[in-house]
Image (cartoon, helix red, strand yellow):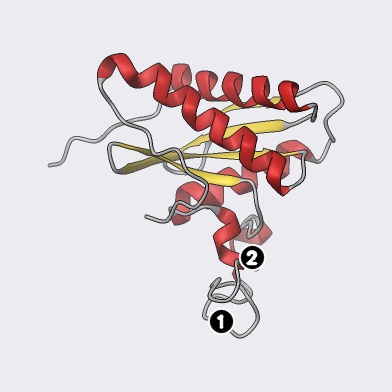
């Protein structure tokens, strides 16, 4: 039997708070969703003025990042993005009843080398979604620092 880290509500809330603080700082109305390792939401928040489509999109990105253990934009990054036409996973976005997101804004949450969930963002352009996602991951790192757990904070995550 293997002991495993489990993402909980306090960590999810810390991530949402960090991501939304960055969104406010850069002036974009975001929706942020944090999911557990199975892709189920622990926290979802839509800022005032954010699009009504944001919650579903953010959830889809977080679901994809957690389940496939990679940043969602890596699916379409040339030349070897697996979801690009002619590559091995072309069409994967139709999986899971269309919930599989293959564009920027979803990041796996990696703590001490293990994927424990995902964070998804919707509302900004790609650069803004990345900035807010990284802010959420940094906030988790700060939250977990007293426990001496390390969080991977980078845009291009593939586990």
* Quadrant into which the N terminus falls: top left
Residue 131 rendering spot, x and y as whole percentages: 63, 37
Q: Residue at x 63, y 60 (%)?
A: 102
Density class for disc 1 (Cα within 10 Å; few <14, some 14-19, many ≥20) is some
Image: 63 above or below 80: above
What residue is shown with label 2?
93
Q: Quadrant of residue 27?
A: top right
Q: Of discs 1 and 2, which sits in the foreground?
A: 1
Q: Residue at x 28, y 26 (%)?
A: 149
Q: Residue at x 66, y 25 (%)?
A: 22
Image: 37 above or below 49: below
Q: Residue at x 54, y 73 (%)?
A: 82
* Quadrant into which the C terminus falls: bottom left
What residue is shown with label 1?
87
Image: 87 above or below 15: below
Q: Tell me whether the residue at label 1 lies in contact with that at label 2, contact meaning CB atoms closer than 8 angstroms.
A: no
Query: Does label 1 or label 2 sit earlier along the sequence?
Result: 1
Q: How many marks?
A: 2
Number of the label disc, if any, that sits on residue 21: none
Label 1 to label 2: alpha-carbon separation? 13 Å
Residue 88 rendering spot, x and y as whole percentages: 52, 80
Secondary element at tag 1: loop
Residue 71 rendering spot, x and y as whole percentages: 52, 52
Secondary element at tag 2: helix
Density class for disc 2 (Cα within 10 Å; few <14, some 14-19, many ≥20) is some
Q: Quadrant of residue 103?
A: bottom right
Q: Residue 155: in sight, yes or no?
A: yes
**Residue that extends furthest to the bottom in the rendered view of this protein:** 86
Q: Residue 41: in sight, yes or no?
A: no
């Amino acid at each position: 039997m293997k002991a495993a880290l489990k993402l909980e509500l306090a960590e999810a809330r810390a991530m949402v708070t960090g991501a939304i603080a960055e969104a406010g700082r850069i002036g974009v109305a975001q929706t942020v969703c944090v999911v557990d390792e199975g892709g189920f939401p622990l926290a979802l928040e839509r800022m005032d003025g954010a699009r009504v489509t944001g919650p579903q999109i953010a959830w889809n990105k977080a679901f994809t990042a957690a389940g496939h253990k990679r940043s969602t934009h890596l699916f379409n990054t040339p030349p070897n993005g697996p979801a690009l036409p002619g590559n091995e996973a072309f069409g994967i976005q139709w999986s899971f009843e269309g919930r599989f997101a293959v564009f920027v804004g979803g990041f796996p949450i990696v703590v001490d080398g293990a994927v424990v969930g995902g964070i998804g963002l919707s509302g900004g352009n790609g650069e803004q979604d990345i900035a807010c996602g990284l802010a959420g991951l940094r906030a988790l790192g700060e939250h977990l620092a007293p426990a001496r757990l390390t969080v991977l904070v980078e845009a291009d995550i593939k586990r």
